[in-house]
Image: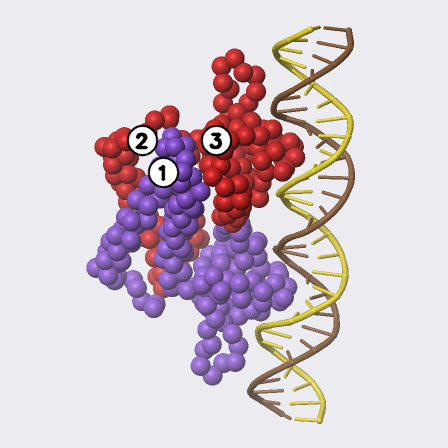
Chain colours: A purple, B red, C yellow, D brown
DNA sequence: TATACTGTTCAGTATTGACTGAACAGACTA
DNA sequence: TAGTCTGTTCAGTCAATACTGAACAGTATA
């Protein structure tokens, strides 16, 4: 177990992360794992570590880590010569999370599109609701990639503390 | 009840919208109400209309409409001289939904900030995880308003079929 | 082969919450 | 005041699921 500045502050942070992720459909323990992996020392922790730190059963940890790996928030690493599994936050997790959010734009744009297909023969005023909805999401869907590129460009420009990965 | 091009196509669309909103924490019937209000003719529908069209109880409609009003997706209108309540999609619902999503950026940025506070005395490599997370969300939090402004400007420029509202 | 250790699977529990039917409340007509 | 609309509230049911404890399976050491 690592040295944390204040155990209670860490615990409070873990709880906060857990609550932040809950409305996004991530079960409580999943959020706790993320929170803990964000501040744990070292960054890679075993299933046993997680179970101990969070006071959860091995079963929960096993199921949740598999889930978090599937949604690409964490990854499983095996240190050479070791037979234990370690978990850590994926370096690109947050970038991909944001990109997934942007893919959500497409979903809604398509939904509007389908609605307009249903109202194909309807008069314009009736279609207006869906037209504006479509226009808006199509706009952001079109513009977001450029913004994402600017972010990546800015990152490449100042690789200051990009030690890991 | 209005004239729909194809009842089954409409029903299918309603179902699709319902499924689209489900992962966002909107209960099934809530999504159905949104779907129906997107294509219904006329755009304003009574609680009874909704109950009949969706085959749901008055109680569900009452609770869900109140919820959807609270999250500002729909609004309750009273036609002059009428004593019945009508519901319709708010004209600015989708814009505000997107803005709410952007507010989510702030939540995550703050979360990273809190984590960094917990690791105030930790060495740089340990803080790196949270630093990149913070930088990324702060970047988008900073840039998104400008993009939103561009959208509004573009809308003002061509007020073509902005008949309603 | 025995044993320690890893992690997974599975049955069972307990909680949450979406939805309904029925009772209730308020406002307009007769 | 009675009757008929509106919409809300409430108790109860039903289904989904998060979580646990215990049994299981695989792999390395003795």
Residue B109 visible in rendering: no
Q: Position of residue D12 (x, y in %)?
A: 78, 39
Q: Position of residue A68 (x, y in %)?
A: 50, 62
Q: Position of residue C7 (x, y in %)?
A: 57, 73
Q: Quadrant of the C terminus of chain A?
A: bottom left
Mark 3 or 1: the one toward you: 3
Residue at x-position 56% and y-position 69%: A47
Label at residue B118: none
Residue at x-position 33% and y-position 45%: A138
Q: Which residue occupies the foreground of this view, A164 or A1?
A: A164
Check the residue under mark 2 and report the chain it is in: B
Pointer 1 residue: A131
Q: Are marks 2 and 1 in contact (CB under 8 Å)?
A: yes
Q: Are marks 3 and 1 in contact (CB under 8 Å)?
A: no
Residue A24 visible in rendering: yes
How packed mark 2 is, by other alpha carbons closer than 10 Å (few <14, some 14-19, many 20 or more), is few
Q: Which residue occupies the foreground of this view, A19 or A135?
A: A135
Residue at x-position 23% and y-position 58%: A153
Task: Indicate the secondary structure of the residue bearing disc 3.
Answer: loop
Pointer 2 residue: B161
A140 lies left or right of C5 = left
Q: Are marks 2 and 1 on the same chain?
A: no
How packed mark 3 is, by other alpha carbons closer than 10 Å (few <14, some 14-19, many 20 or more), is some
Check the residue under mark 3 and report the chain it is in: B
Pointer 3 residue: B41
Q: Quadrant of residue A91?
A: bottom left
Above or below residue B76? Residue B122 is below
A64 lies left or right of C11 = left
């Amino acid at each position: 177990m690592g040295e944390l500045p204040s155990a209670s502050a860490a615990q409070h942070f873990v709880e906060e992360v857990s609550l932040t992720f809950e409305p996004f459909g991530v079960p409580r323990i999943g959020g706790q794992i993320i929170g803990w992996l964000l501040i744990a020392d070292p960054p890679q922790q075993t299933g046993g570590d997680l179970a101990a730190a969070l006071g959860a059963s091995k079963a929960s940890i096993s199921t949740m880590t598999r889930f978090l790996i599937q949604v690409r928030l964490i990854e499983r690493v095996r240190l050479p010569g070791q037979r234990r599994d370690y978990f850590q936050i994926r370096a690109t997790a947050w970038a991909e999370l944001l990109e997934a959010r942007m893919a959500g734009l497409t979903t809604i744009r398509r939904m509007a599109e389908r609605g307009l297909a249903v109202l194909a023969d309807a008069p314009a005023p009736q279609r207006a609701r869906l037209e504006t909805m479509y226009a808006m999401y199509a706009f952001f869907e079109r513009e977001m990639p450029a913004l994402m590129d600017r972010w990546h460009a800015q990152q490449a420009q100042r690789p200051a503390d990009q030690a890991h990965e």
